[in-house]
Image: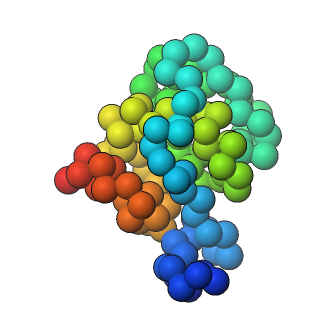
Amino acid sequence: MQGESDRGRVAYLARPHRPALVARTLEELRGPVHGVVELPQRLMWNPQRRFDVDNRDLLLWMYENVLREAIRHDELRRFVNGRMLVRVWPDLNLPHGVRRAWEARHPRLRAAAG
């Protein structure tokens, strides 16, 4: 379920008809590493949208939702932390297209998963 983007690159899909959005660099991802974060309803449809990022399971759940649902780079930058993402990458339950898109752009994630 992948198609070619307008620039000739492979477009990995987060879901049917929705390309996965990937940050240009991991360093630009400056999301929180401590405390409670509330995702906007657009990123999390569940009534429980607050995540204590000090709790690893809740952090994983938040990242899975943000990486799957983000459509703007500012959403990635606001809610995901690049260093934390590398640490938890192997444990994230992501759609195949999202995982492939991020690993294609960021070899550090591919190495962390291996």
The colour mode here is rainbow
Q: Nearer the viewer, residue 17 or 9?
A: 9
Which residue in the rendered view is the most extreme toward the left? 114
Image point 54% across, 76% down: which residue? 11
Where's residue 27, x and y in %? 46, 38
How many marks on residues? 0
Q: Nearer the viewer, residue 23 or 52?
A: 23
The reply, left or right, for residue 64 in relation to residue 43 is: left
The reply, left or right, for residue 53 in relation to residue 42 is: left
Residue 65: image quadrant is top right
Q: Is residue 94 above or below residue 78?
A: below
The reply, left or right, for residue 50 in relation to residue 103 is: right
Image point 62% across, 17% down: which residue? 36
Where's residue 76, x and y in %? 61, 43
Image point 64% across, 83% down: which residue? 6
Where's residue 82, x and y in %? 45, 37
Image point 57% across, 14% down: which residue? 35
Which residue in the rendered view is the most extreme toward the top? 35
Residue 13 is at least partly visible in this image: yes
Residue 95 is at least partly visible in this image: no
Q: Is residue 57 above or below residue 104?
A: above
The reply, left or right, for residue 89 in relation to residue 26 is: left
Where's residue 7, x and y in %? 58, 81
